[in-house]
Image (cartoon, rainbow, N blue to C red):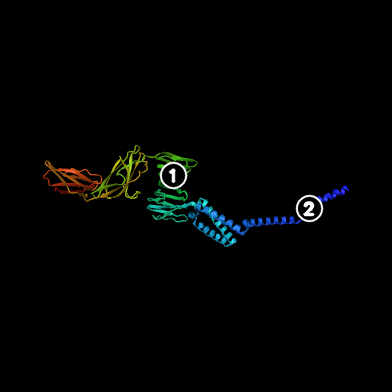
Amino acid sequence: MAKKTEKKRGRLKWRTIIIPFSTVQFWVSFLLVLFAISAVTSLLYLQLLSPKAQARRLIARGEKQFDQSIVLGIKELAFDDFQSAQETLFLARKAYDNRKNSEAQVLAEQTLATLEKAMELLRSDEFYRRERMASMSYIKGSVEVNLAGSLEWQPARKSIKLKKGDKVRTRSGSRCVIQFDDGSQLTIKSNSLVHIDEMTEDIRTRTKNSAIKLLVSDVEASILRPTAKGSRFLIETPGSVAQVRKARMNIRVNDKNETEYKLLSGDVSVRAGDREIRLGQSEVVKLAKTGGVLSRGKLLGVPAAREPANLNWMVSRAEKTSVRFSWNWMKEAKYYHLAVASDRYFSNIIYDNPKINGTRATVKGMVPGLYYWRVSSVDSRGQESLFSSFRVFRIIRDQVPPQLSMNDPIVFSNPSGSRVFLSGAVEPGSSLSFDGKQVPLSPDGVFRSFLTVRRDQGTIRIRATDPAGNVLNQVRELQ
């Protein structure tokens, strides 16, 4: 009896557990949970997986990346890509608004692809590297160029533009000047061959890089200090590479591929083999083709040009005149070399004397015109320094008397005599006298002066002489 009672109780407990799940309440709860899961799934699908959601997400990514690309300068640096991305992004928004979700996705993906391509270019250094050009500013004799990609040499012209990969060569007795866009100059003398290896500019930092290669050559370089930090100018020769920051120098490579650097002034370091050589001012270094140092020493001092002064005007009445030149004395010099020319490149030589004793020389028979002159020193072994910076002067022939403008004299009489106040102006640089008495003049030729005369004197004699020696004589009455 007891066992039956326990079995009965056990059944009751089992039914107590099972019965609630078999009721209507269970199915209602199950359906509610199922509905909630379906709603959440549908919502997630609409927000994340539906074509509309994907199109909206891609458009948002495109808009964000488009704004970032504008900040990086896509509009200024890659305008075609900017215009294409702007157009496809606009069409994607329009398709999305018209519920053309698939089309909107395709257009948004095109926008992202265009922007990614442009951003990749904007991140690369090559994209910001712009090719520069140099010009041929002076040509004398037989000068030829070989343009990049060409096998033929052609005569050089002043209008020709030089860029990376071009070559320049000069024949015997010829020379030319290459003008770089940063103001630097390279004077290529006769029997030289020069390669232009690099001429670029980074448009972000404005740094300019230039590199030239010299074979058998003789060149003068005037390299200006770069305006943008990080710019460089390299000169490569067999066995060495010179990095020039600012310099006035001469580089010569002979037929044995030996290189001689002569630095007048500036900042130059030379990499030769596994060593770096810092050139000092007025120093000369000769290197072997393997980079070894053959010799090193100081340059012969360069005399400073004195007279005629730079930009001086020399006025003369004569058809031909003599000009006196002078310069500073140099301790090591035995002779001095004076050169006078009618052009700044000293191709049209008027006077050339490499053996002048002393620091003065007179050149006779110079006609009116514009002249350039420079001087160097020569020691007892015949070694010559670099030339001094050239100076320019002009000779003017003047046969016209000086101009004089004068106000009416003002006479102040007294018992002992009369004083006359004279004022006016004469041609600047002239001398002026009244009755033989010199009158002080201001730099612009203006004068104000009192002159004492006799009471019965009715006139004064005026004499004006200009720098060329032309004379003006006048007589002015006193009232």
x 60%, y 59%: residue:
52
Identity of the amino acid at label 2? Ile
- The reply to whether the C-beta atoms of the residues labelled 1 and 2 are less than 8 Å apart is no
In the picture shown, does residue 277 fall above or below 35?
A: above
Q: Going by the picture, which residue comes out furthest to the right?
A: 1
Mark seen at residue 244: 1
Q: Is residue 238 left or right of residue 380?
A: right
Q: Going by the picture, which residue comes out furthest to the top?
A: 331
Tally of numbered discs: 2
Q: Is residue 319 left or right of residue 455?
A: right
Mark with earlier residue (1, 2): 2
Query: Mark 2 — residue?
Result: 18
The kind of secondary structure element at disc 1 is: strand
CA–CA distance between discs 1 and 2?
97 Å
Q: Is residue 381 left or right of residue 419?
A: right
Q: Is residue 59 visible?
A: yes
> Residue 13's x, y, as percent?
81, 50
The kind of secondary structure element at disc 2 is: helix
